[in-house]
Image (tube, rainbow, N blue to C red):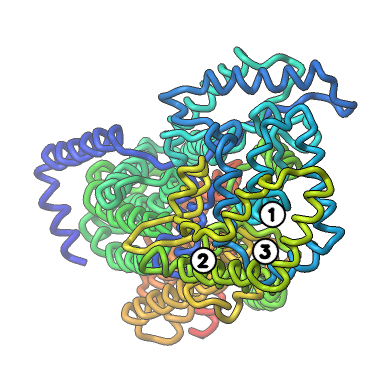
Amino acid sequence: MRLFGTLYLFFARRRGRLYAAVFALMAFCLVAFSSMEMDKSIEAMLPDGVSGAASDFRMLQKTPFARKLLVNLRVSGHGQLKESDRQALLEAAQRLEGLMLPPFFSRVVSGPGEQLKAGFLPWLIEALPNLVTEQDLDRLSRELNADGVTRRLQDSYTQLLSPQGWAVKGMIQRDPLALRELALEKFAALNMIPGMRIEGDRFVSADGKNALLIAETAVDMADSEAGRALLDHFEMLVAQSVPAQLEVSLVSAHRYTVANAEAIQEDLVLTLGATALALALIFLFFLRSLGAVAVFVLPLAVLSVATLAVALCFERVSAITLGFGAVLMGISVDFALHVYFALRSGSAQAQRVIEDIARPLLLGGLTTIGAFSVLLFSDLPGQRQLAVFSIAGILAALLFSLVLLPHILGGSGKARGQKAFSLPKGKGPWHRPVVLVCWAALMVLCSLQGMNLGFNGDLRALSITPADLQDAEEHLKQTWGNMRGSAMIFAEGETLQEALEVNEALFGALSRALPEAKLVSLAPLVPSLRAQQQSRELWQRFWHGAQGQKILQEMDVQGRTMGFSQTAFTPFLDSLRAEPLAVQIEDLRGQGLGEILDALVLQEEGKVRLLTLAPDGPELVGLFENASPVEGAHLVSQSRFRQQLSSAVGADFTRFIVSALLVVALLVTLLFRQPKKILCALLPVVSGLLFMFGVMGWWGLEFNLFNVVATILIIGLGVDYGIFMVCKLSEGYDHDTDRAILVSGLTTIAGFGALVLAGHPALHSIGVTVLLGISAAIPAALFVIPAIYLRGSR
């Protein structure tokens, strides 16, 4: 292409200005990089679009305990709990709570509020007429027969004679038949911590060996630096307040964020350093020239430009995207190597060499850009960042290679004693029929093994979870119940009353379909106003009907027999005649249940959502499989989310791969316009994909979110190798293309090989899978294309 030859001549007389401009650009990139906000969490690789998976992920963040810190204090050992250890546990919990203050901790809950303890039960008894159902009244009819009335009155009489009788006198007068038991069952539907009991005003486990603190913090759970400061501060508080015989564990999203951030940070240093070292060794081994330094430095400049482009397009840049820099360094050096070897071949003057290689270089770059461009339409912000990062980096690599590098190398066009690499000729192991048979057999075998390839949408496989955090999660689950793993069902309405009506219909449907399931819901305690009116009518009809009057008569007879005064039950009888006030949802806040209310009532986007928690399992997911059993109710399940994400990965894989292949095939067709050339140019892509699928299927590896990116890479890189080799074979020029492809392939493998060293599953996944694909694409370009192309030319 004459444009780049003209540019070479133009800058040949203005090299100082060119170098100054590039130096200024690099300085600007470094300044921008120093002020860039980096996101080290896994969230960049999670959906943020309008798909079902994206919507469910956003709703999963609203789980009551998702953003809280759960602190468990435990008495060490497995023997019987000693009184001294029990006292030490409660005192340590109190001391630690007292130290958990702002700015790191905004609120700490360790037990029920004073208002709940003092006034909640009388309020609950008053509210009961608004809450009863027909099933409740049928149950009272059965239980409050003559024996049942007698037994309950005897229990009440025994309580009055106990030392605390003076404290319960008012309650017994108001509720002599212990109807509060029915009301407390309604209240139990709000218990989000199944394994909890109250001791000394604190949450303790059923065996008394654990105490629980639930803390809130203003620290963003995606902020790894602030999260590390929070965890360090908490460890200091534990050392100050908790004796050695107690164990303390903390479970929060911050621990996951910090663990992943630190792993990624270590991997960035390791992978980028290993890549730079590997590239240096390759260049020194194959090139042994000072010019190799320029080719080696070029990817660093490309990396700076690509990082700047992402920083300009996105508010926060994922560290995983920057970890991808090791790969981009391997890609960008390919273009520089072709320029380097072409100029060193001595086959023509520099201007003519640049014009010759510009066409395959540009079209190779454009096909790679076309492959990456499909990721711009992903639901994952991290994949969109990778697309921008790669596109900007490849464009920068093309410009630097064709415009800047020739001047740095001097453009002499003279051979410097380097013997060009060439394919082995003649008979022997590289004889063309042998190459073709071996290649065909390998592709068939890989195609068969690739049928075993599956898709995995489990996010836990994409992040680091330290062993001690896994143990803490398991202990929390075994001790307090699976409070962090419940499925959520949102009852939605335009108004609060609409949401309450949907919520009570949902509670009824779940109770009938899953009778053994422990549900957490507001429905039993705060029905809609319409349902409360129906309950009051049922209540009045019951007590003024034959069955209710019979119970009251039996109570009067048995009360007199036991020695109760004639007016002992007057408050109870008066309440049966009174019209109770309807239960309002804010009444719960007034009774000390504000914490629960905030967790279960969400008002946003002009809608009201009431949250119900249920055990996450196939029965529940199956209930919502085709459609919601209640209009306005939406299930958000972690197990279903993993299934949705697996389906999304599979759908994205098909969509992106087909789109990338179509874009690449179209560009290759426009370039060559001959079936043989087109097929040969695409052969490394096909070989790399089939080999990757086959080995992954053979090893039992599964596709995940990051393997989709890896596949796009194989397509982009493989077609570059094919274009370079077909141009060499078809256009008759020889600018050390074989050697350039070999060395560029080795540098790409070095880049991907560095990712294999990463400890973070996301980066490691990209490294392993792309390494497989590129390892097959390179020999396909070097050996199979010549075998097919030259055989067909005879």
Residue 598: percent from the left, percent from the top?
A: 46, 48
Tell me which numbered mark, 1 or 2, is placed earlier along the sequence: 1
Residue shown at the point (27%, 52%) measured from the top left: 313
Tag 1 secondary structure: loop
Tell me which numbered mark, 1 or 3, is placed earlier along the sequence: 1
Residue on which disc 3 sits: 696
Q: Nearer the viewer, mark 1 or mark 2?
A: 1
Residue 89: percent from the left, percent from the top?
A: 72, 22
Using the image, tell me which numbered label, if any, was put on residue 179. 1
Q: From this viewpoint, which residue is outermost toward the front?
A: 566
Q: Looking at the rendering, in which quadrant would you find the N terminus? A: bottom left
> How many neighbours does mark 2 have within 10 angstroms: few (below 14), some (14-19), or many (20 or more)?
many
Tag 3 secondary structure: helix
* Up/down of 45 relative to 719, above or below: above
* Up/down of 459 relative to 14, above or below: below
Residue on which disc 2 sits: 532
Disc 1 residue type (three-letter): Leu
Residue 172: percent from the left, percent from the top?
A: 69, 43
Determine which quarter of the picture holds residue 334. Answer: bottom left
Tag 2 secondary structure: helix
Disc 3 residue type (three-letter): Met
Q: Nearer the viewer, mark 2 or mark 3?
A: 2
Residue shown at the point (65%, 59%) measured from the top left: 519
Q: Nearer the viewer, mark 1 or mark 3?
A: 1
Q: Relative to residue 366, is residue 105 drawn left or right?
A: right
Q: How many discs appear?
A: 3
Q: From this viewpoint, which residue is outermost toward the right?
A: 79
Residue 468 is at least partly visible in this image: yes
